[in-house]
Amino acid sequence: MHLLTREAFAVYFRHLKPDGILAVHVSNSYLDLSSPVAALGRLLGHEAHLVENEENDATRTFPADWVLVGDHESERFPWIKEKETEIAISPGLRIWTDDFSNLWQILSL
């Protein structure tokens, strides 16, 4: 969880190039990690897109969910709009920080 805080994201974006994209792997059977990641990205003024990768035996690719966070991604990479899934952020979701996180808010049953 400490990798998904406001302070951690500030460090990530400080080290990314201005046109860089932060790719966060959020696959999880029990937690909706896309919500806090998208909320953090938007708080910092970036776009957030959920891209779900399907399993492909031919390329030996496993299914995975990723949130891509950056500036103007959908303009630079038009394929994102075709592959993305809407990220629903709960109205009461509080941004995670080094001092606060709440797994109960993102529990998916």
Image (tube, rainbow, N blue to C red):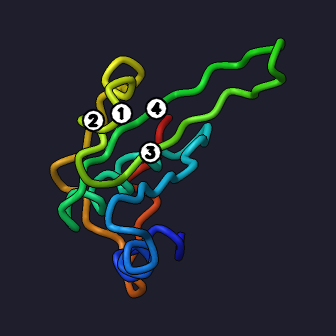
In front of the other: 32 or 102: 32
- Mark 3 and mark 2 lie on one chain; the one further toward the N terminus is 3
Mark 4, residue position = 51
User: Badges 4 and 3: C-beta atoms under 8 Å apart?
Assistant: yes
Distance between the alpha carbons at the discs numbered 1 and 2: 5 Å
Distance between the alpha carbons at the discs numbered 3 and 2: 13 Å
The residue depicted at 41 percent of the width and 50 percent of the height is 106
Q: Secondary structure at mark 3?
A: strand
In front of the other: 19 or 6: 19
Above/below status of 66 relative to 93: above
User: Badges 1 and 2: C-beta atoms under 8 Å apart?
Assistant: yes
Above/below status of 74 relative to 105: above
Q: Secondary structure at mark 2?
A: helix
Name which residue type carries label 3.
Answer: Val
**Horizontal and vertical percent position of residue 80:** 37, 28
1 vs 4, front mark: 1
The residue depicted at 34 percent of the width and 76 percent of the height is 6
- Mark 1 and mark 4 lie on one chain; the one further toward the N terminus is 4
Residue density around tag 4, few if under 14, some if 14–19, many if 20 or more, within 10 Å: many
Mark 1, residue position = 77
Mark 3, residue position = 67
- Mark 1 and mark 3 lie on one chain; the one further toward the N terminus is 3
User: Badges 1 and 3: C-beta atoms under 8 Å apart?
Assistant: no
Residue density around tag 2, few if under 14, some if 14–19, many if 20 or more, within 10 Å: some
In front of the other: 69 or 28: 69
Mark 2, residue position = 74
59 vs 19, left or right, is right
Name which residue type carries label 4.
Answer: Val
Distance between the alpha carbons at the discs numbered 2 and 4: 12 Å
- Mark 2 and mark 4 lie on one chain; the one further toward the N terminus is 4
